[in-house]
């Protein structure tokens, strides 16, 4: 295993990001989601750094990276701009991009906007934007499962979290969605430290508030967004989607019809994992990524 290090990068997008990086070889960049950090990928990076260059930022709003003040600072175009700027700062041209949760949402967006930079795409439990918006309108179960997004967008959420306390949020909201024993020794303290950084709670929640995804209430009758029935750009690059099938927030319906949007697609379903599949089942995720890279590289 190669040793990884943390460096801080000041980007032309106006933020400074702490970046975990190391290794040498074909580059792989990783994007984490809510409410985590680059540590989401600690197992995969340690393994893949033996024969790849790997890098994962604590994204804007998380841990000790910059926390711009406005909600609109967390719109997806800014997240994607951070990614491209970081790749430039690292001297990386084309790369494999791996994303989970909100990091996966940013990875889908980056692949759509910058296919010249993304050679291969790996997604872990993060819905394609078209399928997600369609299911939020058409699938009652997915709409019900996504009501937490409405709660996180509420301007009063920080007050409720403060009243609840971060330790209670960890135990009742976060850990309760995980399999027994999934949280290792010392992990709780790391999360609490990261969440307690000044401005972190608001900044993390602003990812939800800045998103343009429409999340109707369970029984709400809403106008169907016109764009979800129009032709949507298809992704050309080889894509691997890894899905923890016990995810309570993002249901398996997110895989239905995905091949129409992503022709060069392979799906690996991890039956006994939930939403946080990268560290719930790290060996399975790492093996799937390695097999995908070998397949794509092997076909030239």
Image (cartoon, rainbow, N blue to C red):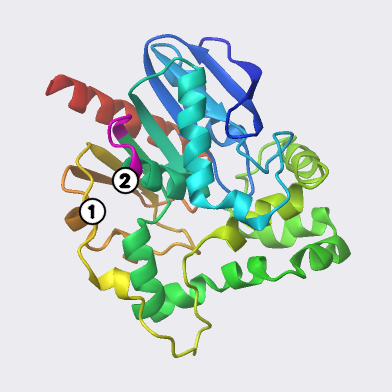
Horizontal and vertical percent position of residue 202? 74, 55
> Which numbered marker is on residue 213?
none
Q: On the rendered structure, is 181 left or right of 159?
A: left
Horizontal and vertical percent position of residue 74? 59, 50
> Is residue 56 within the magenta segment?
no
Q: Quadrant of residue 50?
A: top left
Image quadrant holding the C terminus, namely top left
Badge count: 2
Horizontal and vertical percent position of residue 136? 41, 73
Horizontal and vertical percent position of residue 275? 49, 53
Q: Check the image and name the residue furthest to the right.
A: 163
> Which numbered marker is on residue 112?
2
Q: Confirm whether residue 5 shows in the render.
A: yes
In 3D space, how far apart are the residues under numbered discs 2 and 1 (Cα atoms)? 7 Å
Give the answer, above or below, for where 147 lies relative to 207.
below
Q: Tell me whether the residue at label 2 lies in contact with that at label 1, contact meaning CB atoms closer than 8 angstroms.
A: yes
Q: Nearer the viewer, residue 240 or 103?
A: 103
Magenta span: 113-120
């Amino acid at each position: 295993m190669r040793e990884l290090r943390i460096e801080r990068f000041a980007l032309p997008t106006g933020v400074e990001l702490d970046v975990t990086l190391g290794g040498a070889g074909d580059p792989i960049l990783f994007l984490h989601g809510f409410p985590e950090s680059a540590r989401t990928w600690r197992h995969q990076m340690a393994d893949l750094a033996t024969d790849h260059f790997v890098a994962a930022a604590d994204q804007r709003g998380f841990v000790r990276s910059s926390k711009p003040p406005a909600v609109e600072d967390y719109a997806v175009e800014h997240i994607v701009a951070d990614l491209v700027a970081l790749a430039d700062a690292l001297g990386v041209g084309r790369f494999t991009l791996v994303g989970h949760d909100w990091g996966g949402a940013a990875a889908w967006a980056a692949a759509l906007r910058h296919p010249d930079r993304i050679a291969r795409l790996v997604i872990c439990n993060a819905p394609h934007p078209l399928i997600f918006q369609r299911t939020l309108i058409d699938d009652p179960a997915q709409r019900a499962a996504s009501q937490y997004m409405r709660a996180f967008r509420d301007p009063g959420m920080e007050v409720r979290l403060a009243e609840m306390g971060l330790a209670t949020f960890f135990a009742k909201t976060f850990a309760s969605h995980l399999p027994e024993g999934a949280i290792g020794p010392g992990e709780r303290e790391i999360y609490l430290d990261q969440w307690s950084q000044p401005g972190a709670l608001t900044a993390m929640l602003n990812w939800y508030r800045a998103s343009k995804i429409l999340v109707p209430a369970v029984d709400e009758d809403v106008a169907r967004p016109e764009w979800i029935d129009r032709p949507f750009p298809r992704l050309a690059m080889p894509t691997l989607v890894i899905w923890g099938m016990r995810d309570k927030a993002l249901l398996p319906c997110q895989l239905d019809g995905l091949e129409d949007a992503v022709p060069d697609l392979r799906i690996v379903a991890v039956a006994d994992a939930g939403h946080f599949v990268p560290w719930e089942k790290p060996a399975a995720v790492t093996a799937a990524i390695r097999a995908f890279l070998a397949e794509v590289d092997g076909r030239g």
